[in-house]
Amino acid sequence: MKILVTGGTGYIGSHTVVELQQEGLDVVIVDNLSNSTKDVIYGIEKITGTRPVLEVFDLCDINLTRQLFQKHPDIRAVVHFAAYKSVGESVKEPLRYYHNNILSSINLLKGMMDSGVDHLVFSSSCTVYGQPDKLPVTEEAPLKRPESPYGNTKKVMEDIISDTVSSSGLKAILLRYFNPIGAHESAEIGESPTGIPDNLVPYITQTAIGKRDHLRVFGDDYDTPDGTPIRDYIHVVDLAKAHVVALKRLVDKKNKKDCEVFNLGTGRGYSVLEAIKAFEKVSGGKLNYKIVDRRPGDIVKVWADTKLANRELGWKSGKGLEVMMRTAWNWELKLAGKF
Ligand code: NAD
Ligand code: WQD
């Protein structure tokens, strides 16, 4: 069975390609390499022994998107990761974000419809919940106005997919990720942000390796036990495995609704200071950090209710915070030629 993975040379996509291949599935990747490099397919090959097919083009081009499905008529299902993902950038350049994230997805859906491919797994985000009123947050929680244009592209795409499901044979699973971190145990693939990282863990590892002088901790006066915000960090390999399960659920027709939504988190929250402590423990060094002002738009605390995913997908995250930090650190060491 052939699976199309859009954004498959990216961070979460590459880890998912590994898991799909290890389940014996054939993978075709589409990526325009706007936020990743071709080398990632060699990293995947080192882990699995199979180099995935990589088609380099922009999904915003409808003709190339349609041609892809003609070239690979045996594609049975799609896992759709391709998107821009920087919250800050999306605030500065909303049109670039709406254009890329929405148009590419509409083109993909059109290509799928034309070729009769009717199984889709989509990367959504806990950002659609904003600051939830109740924790842990369930899939039933009301969606809040997203804090950023990026977040809104996820909300809009959930609606577009759900409407397409209602009007066609499409069956979809929307996966709402919490905070994916860490890297593959082999350190052959990991997260490679271009420029200055927005997210906590790449900033921590880049500070520890000496690429950044210090980590700014954005506020310690929140209403949390140590004053710093709380997130549900999940290991990227645990997250990747959930995609394989979701895809099989669709293909084996085990889905209970035509459009299902699942939270992917661990169900446990950690503060920024707890994350730093876990990193210091596994790396064996002190991290240079300073408490600074709050970052505008930051949520105070969020963690997932994972019962639905545990029960319906038969999936559970297994790797703890220290494994997340150790693998993230090994990946940074590998990039520096020290692993
Ligand atoms: P990433 O940037 O590493 O991967 C995305 C890939 O998509 C990149 O390789 C990029 O080159 C490609 N891409 C972007 N636009 C494209 C286009 N128009 N045509 C073809 N390829 C294109 O990001 P990631 O962290 O792996 O995230 C994957 C998905 O998960 C995204 O949809 C993201 O919004 C979502 N998500 C990520 C997080 C997170 O914290 N990393 C959390 C929740 C949801
Ligand atoms: C985590 C915590 C920061 C950097 C973002 C997106 C969200 C989703 C996940 C895609 C926060 C603190 C961070 C730093 C810090 N992505 N921090 N210093 O904000 O939960 O969510 O990624 O859908 O949409 O908004 O993740 O890693 O940026 O921050 O103190 O240099 O670390 O304040 O409390 P966040 P993050």
Image: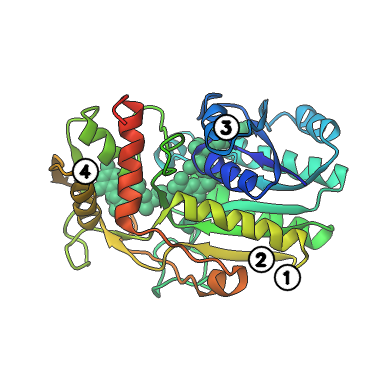
Quarter of the image with the C terminus in it: top left
Instruction: Determine contact: label 2, label 1, CB under 8 Å.
Output: yes
Q: Which residue is mark 3?
A: 45
Q: Quadrant of residue 329?
A: top left
Q: Is mark 4 within 8 Å of ligand 2?
A: no
**Rendering coords of residue 327 (x, y %):** 35, 44
The residue indicated by pointer 4 is: 283
- Residue 304, label in figure: none
Q: Nearer the viewer, residue 235 or 144?
A: 235
Q: Earlier in the sequence, mark 4 or mark 1?
A: 1
The first of marks 4 and 3 along the sequence is 3
The residue lying at 32 percent from left, 56 percent from top is: 321
Q: Along the horizontal axis of the image, is 194 left or right of 292?
A: right
The residue lying at 64 percent from left, 43 percent from top is: 21
Query: Which callout, 3 or 1, points at the residue further toward the start of the chain?
Result: 3
Q: Which residue matches tag 1?
A: 257
Distance from disc 3 to disc 1, alpha carbons, whole Å, reads 36 Å
Q: Looking at the image, can residue 120 be seen?
A: yes
Q: Amino acid at mark 1?
A: Lys
172, above or below 193, in the image: below
Left of 46 or right of it: where is 22?
right
Secondary structure of residue under mark 2? strand
Earlier in the chain: of badge 3 and badge 2, it is: 3
Q: Earlier in the sequence, mark 2 or mark 4?
A: 2
Give how far across and how far down residue 261 sits, in percent. 61, 65
Query: Which color scheme does this rendered protein use?
Result: rainbow
